[in-house]
Image (cartoon, rainbow, N blue to C red):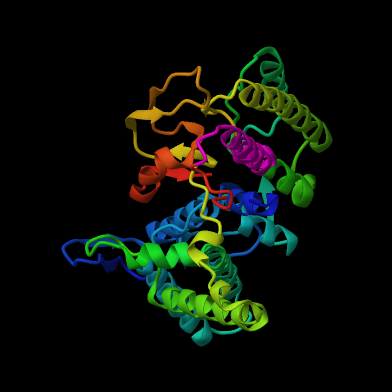
């Protein structure tokens, strides 16, 4: 999966905006949105929020977890634990990137937030590399990865599964069974 | 622009009628898309979902044509349509790539399918696969085979074209709790063991063991 596709899925998450226009209820295929009244907060999917923000038709309200203190807590918690801690949103990385790219003027202390999220991401990626390494070394057959987000899985997913495939082929070809035809893979 | 009401879908044997809201329909499409993307083999075809999604998109397009131009609502609807169209196209393209990659095996599986079993190819995909096979055979014959000595002029495509690797690892998220899933050992020193899949948990495991769970919708590949 391309990172852009993970972002595509993240864009379905709801975020609060304050519109500067009015529009009555929109009946999308995926559900109803609105009505929109200037000054009154309303929830819309991120893809719409970004588009409206780009057309200067609204102001974005950052999600409750996108706050310096909260993120510091999360980062420290992540650094303390050996395992993965639950993240405030399954799309924390994509949402941070999208909202900070397009609406940093609506988000207080945007730069600090960016750094904190990046620090948390780096800690988690380091843990992920370690656990992928031990998975391969110990030739595990199964792993539980509950608190990992899609973007993190996606970053090593393709490489890891292909590497495991190659190792499997090499291992099965070592066995003198001769049942696997050389062109089975 | 009122939203269409629930859709009625007949399953193959017509014994069940599924009523899906448009939102559930789009979710099913996204589920099918992700599963197809990450599964090593071609999955069951989902003609009902595709048909209904196309219907919804056409219906919405028709409505938009009648609406007044430059309306903000129109652009919001258009954006949603483009998003849904992207998922649909990506899903269909993914299937075509797999059909082209595994064409003799896909056709063989379809030929040997039991009567009640669901098909993995839609009628159009089936026609495409057959044509692709015929074209490949003609190509091989004209480029090389007819110049070979007479007893070497056949190519067993079923044996030469690699099969999908069902032993590949996949990532999945559990939608419905499953008990006692067998995990086979990797090395000779290991023993097999069973695990329970809790709802909402995520796992990395070989595709072969959980293939039926993907087909039944109990797990989602990610």
A177 inside magenta stretch? yes
Taking the spot 65% from the left edge, 44% from the top edge, the residue there is A158
B222 inside magenta stretch? no
Give the x, y percent position of residue A23: 55, 67
Taking the spot 44% from the left edge, 55% from the top edge, the residue there is B27
Give the quadrant of residue B155.
Answer: bottom right
Give the quadrant of residue A56.
Answer: bottom right
Residue lying at the far left of the rendered structure: B15
Residue lying at the far right of the rendered structure: A111
Taking the spot 33% from the left edge, 48% from the top edge, the residue there is B216
Q: Is residue B9 left or right of residue B181?
A: left
Give the quadrant of residue B182.
Answer: top left
Residue lying at the far bottom of the rendered structure: B66
Of residues B204 and A60, the one drawn nearer to the viewer in this rendering: B204
Give the x, y percent position of residue B51: 39, 73
Task: Identify the main secondary structure in magenta.
Answer: helix
Give the x, y percent position of residue B207: 47, 42
Vertically, is B194 above or below A58? above
Vertically, is B45 above or below A138? below
Taking the spot 51% from the left edge, 66% from the top edge, the residue there is B156
Of residues B144 and B92, the one drawn nearer to the viewer in this rendering: B144
Which contiguous range is marked in magenta?
Answer: A149-178
Instruction: Report whether residue A24 is seen.
Output: no
Vertically, is A130 above or below B175? above
Give the x, y percent position of residue B206: 49, 37
Instruction: Report whether residue A117 is seen.
Output: yes
- Label count reads 0
Of residues A85 and B190, the one drawn nearer to the viewer in this rendering: B190
């Amino acid at each position: 999966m391309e990172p852009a596709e993970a972002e595509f899925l993240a864009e379905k998450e709801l975020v609060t905006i304050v519109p500067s226009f009015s529009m009555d209820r929109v009946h999308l295929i995926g559900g109803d949105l609105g009505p929109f009244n200037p000054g009154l907060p309303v929830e819309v999917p991120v893809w719409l929020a970004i588009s409206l923000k780009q057309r200067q038709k609204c102001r974005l309200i950052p999600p409750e977890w996108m706050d310096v203190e909260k993120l510091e807590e999360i980062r420290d918690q992540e650094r303390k634990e050996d395992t993965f801690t639950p993240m405030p949103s399954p799309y924390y990385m994509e949402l941070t990137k999208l909202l900070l790219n397009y609406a940093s003027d609506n988000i207080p202390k945007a730069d600090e937030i960016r750094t904190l999220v990046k620090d948390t991401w780096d800690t988690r990626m380091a843990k992920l590399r370690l656990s992928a390494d031990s998975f391969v070394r110990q030739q595990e057959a199964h792993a539980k990865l509950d608190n990992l987000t899609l973007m993190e899985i996606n970053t090593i997913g393709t490489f890891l599964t292909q590497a495991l495939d190659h190792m499997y082929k090499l291992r099965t070809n070592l066995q003198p069974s001769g049942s696997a035809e050389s062109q089975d893979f | 622009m009122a939203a269409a009401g629930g859709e009625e879908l007949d399953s193959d044997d017509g014994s069940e009628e599924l009523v899906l809201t448009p939102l559930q329909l789009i979710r099913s499409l996204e589920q099918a898309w992700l599963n197809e993307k990450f599964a090593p083999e071609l999955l069951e075809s989902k003609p009902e979902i595709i048909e209904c999604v196309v219907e919804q998109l056409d219906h919405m397009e028709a409505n938009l044509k009648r609406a007044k131009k430059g309306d903000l609502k129109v652009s919001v609807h258009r954006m949603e349509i483009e998003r849904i169209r992207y998922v649909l196209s990506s899903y269909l393209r993914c299937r075509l790539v797999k059909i082209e990659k595994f064409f003799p095996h896909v056709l063989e599986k379809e030929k040997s399918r039991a009567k009640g079993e669901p098909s993995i190819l839609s009628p159009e995909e089936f026609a495409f696969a057959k044509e692709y096979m015929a074209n490949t055979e003609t190509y091989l014959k004209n480029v090389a085979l007819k110049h070979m000595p007479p007893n070497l002029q056949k190519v067993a495509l079923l044996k030469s074209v690699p099969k999908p690797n069902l032993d590949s690892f996949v990532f999945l998220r559990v939608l419905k709790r499953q008990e006692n899933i067998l995990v086979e050992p990797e090395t000779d020193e290991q023993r097999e063991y069973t695990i329970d899949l809790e709802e909402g948990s995520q796992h990395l495991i070989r595709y072969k063991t959980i293939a039926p769970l993907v087909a039944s919708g109990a797990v989602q590949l990610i």
